Amino acid sequence: MSTTTMTKLCNSYPTTPQIMLECEKELEVLKETFKSGKTKEESWRRSQLKNLLKLLEEKENDIFKALKQDLGKHKVEAYRDEVGTLVKSVHYALDGLKQWMSPKKAKLPIAAFPSSAELLPEPLGLVLIISSWNFPFSLSLEPLIGAIAAGNVVLLKPSDQAPASSSVLAKIIPNYLDNKAIKVIEGDYTVGDKLLQQKWDKIFFTGSPKVAQIVMGAAAKHLTPVTLELGGKCPAIIDSLSSSWDKKIAMKRILSGKFGSCAGQACIGIDYILVDNTFVNELVKLIKLGIPKMLGENPKESHSISRIVNKNQFLRLKNLLDEPMVKKSIIYGGSSDEDNLYIEPTVLLDPPLQSTIMTDEIFGPLLPIITLDKIEDSIEFINARPKPLTIYAFTKNEEFKRKITKGTSSGSLVFNDTIIQYAADTLPFGGVGQSGFGRYHGKFSFDTFSHEKAIARRSFLTDIWFRYPPWSDHTLQLFRSAFIYDYLSVVLITLGLKRA
């Protein structure tokens, strides 16, 4: 059965046992492909990555159209946040692939002399990738790059909340990548539930903590390792800035980090701002001036801000603003257009901390500002809540930077900018605690989809007699000496006084 046929079957509602039987047949194809060993070859991995690069180049317009249809993304934003980052990631993987695949030497204790050891990365096997709707191409293909580089076979389940993008992925991937090793299944949550009932060697999920609990529960039945890329309420700490230039640049980065990526529908977007009482009035003034400069006097007419993905998400965000005490805190924006799935960039000052907008992840163009007696209180404020995916801090105070670094826990910490950590192949991307666990991007993606196998080789030429019974005080002393020798050897190597 072709991937197109399987996609149509799996996208039928309701899901029937016959449909899942056909899907299971396709999973058997993936398993047989992995068993053949071809995905372990460097030549296969390299060819698939090159074909993925070709896909991104040749189908760029199709991707732009799908993102415009699903999310109203301008093609510049689509290229910056999705196509461009993926092209960069593929090149990075191609450049590093040979080194990533190579075994690394390891040291064995003196008791094993003569011997050698190495760590050999090997693919995990059958991988399920479940992606999200807000960056439907990036969050589907970024982990796929790592899974391919590591030599796995993959089944990708795009989000049905971005139907045009899901359809494009299902249509173009079989035309560029090995259809016996990489497959796409479309469908709603019922299809996802059925897929989770299968046995996988790795599950990579991007989405909400609520769905992540279901994913983990299903994975636990088969002891399947899971990477969860979730979200959370990412705070921005705004310290008083003295220079007008610093304030201007900071404001551009803050507004871009909130409204400039998928209209705030981003797990790493700023969720709320923390600022002290002495700076809040100036901050509000800068924000009110900055939004029109970035998005125009009427952002609804602007092509530079995305739309809300669907009516359900629109109504969820509308309900956040309609809470009585929250509505009173609106100081900028607040209008909406349900027919066009548009919500105006909205700023709120000190909404109730117990309100839904301050307890749930916002995932939209709503920006609460919370005032503090002093900015150092931001550390305690953040620590009283679940660990965020990212903390953004705008300050030139080096002592305050050290306090934030040591005093908080988050997936990442960025000073004086936003979002840049996502685009860095040299930095791991991932959360901690409720914001997720596991990491990817660059070499970290390769590691996520690999098992580092320890290999030890020993000669028959010599043997140390005291490793075997019978035991005595003499053999105990010999063991003490041997372990101390190994420890001292490591110290000398570390100090550069002895060669490894």
Image (cartoon, rainbow, N blue to C red):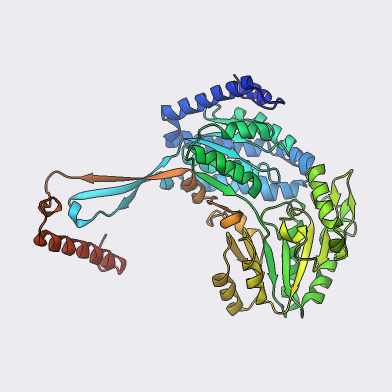
Q: Position of residue 35 (x, y in %)?
A: 42, 28
* Quadrant assignment, res 320: bottom right
Left of 488 or right of it: where is 81?
right
> Quadrant location of the N terminus?
top right
Q: Is 43 or 337 nearer to us in this picture?
A: 337
User: In the figure, 436 relative to 218: above or below?
Assistant: below
Q: Is residue 208 visible?
A: no
* Quadrant assignment, res 173: top right
Left of 440 or right of it: where is 296?
right
Q: Is 426 or 447 nearer to us in this picture?
A: 447
Q: Is residue 338 visible?
A: yes
Q: Position of residue 482 (x, y in %)?
A: 18, 61
Q: Is 306 or 266 nearer to us in this picture?
A: 266
> Quadrant location of the C terminus?
bottom left
* Quadrant assignment, res 23: top right
Q: Position of residue 83 (x, y in %)?
A: 66, 45
Q: Position of residue 66 (x, y in %)?
A: 74, 38
The residue at 11%/59% (across/down) is 475
User: In the figure, 178 relative to 453: above or below?
Assistant: above
The residue at 53%/40% (across/down) is 219
Left of 259 or right of it: where is 197?
left
Q: Is 470 or 54 nearer to us in this picture?
A: 470
Total numbered labels: 0
User: In the figure, 23 relative to 52: above or below?
Assistant: above
The residue at 69%/33% (across/down) is 188
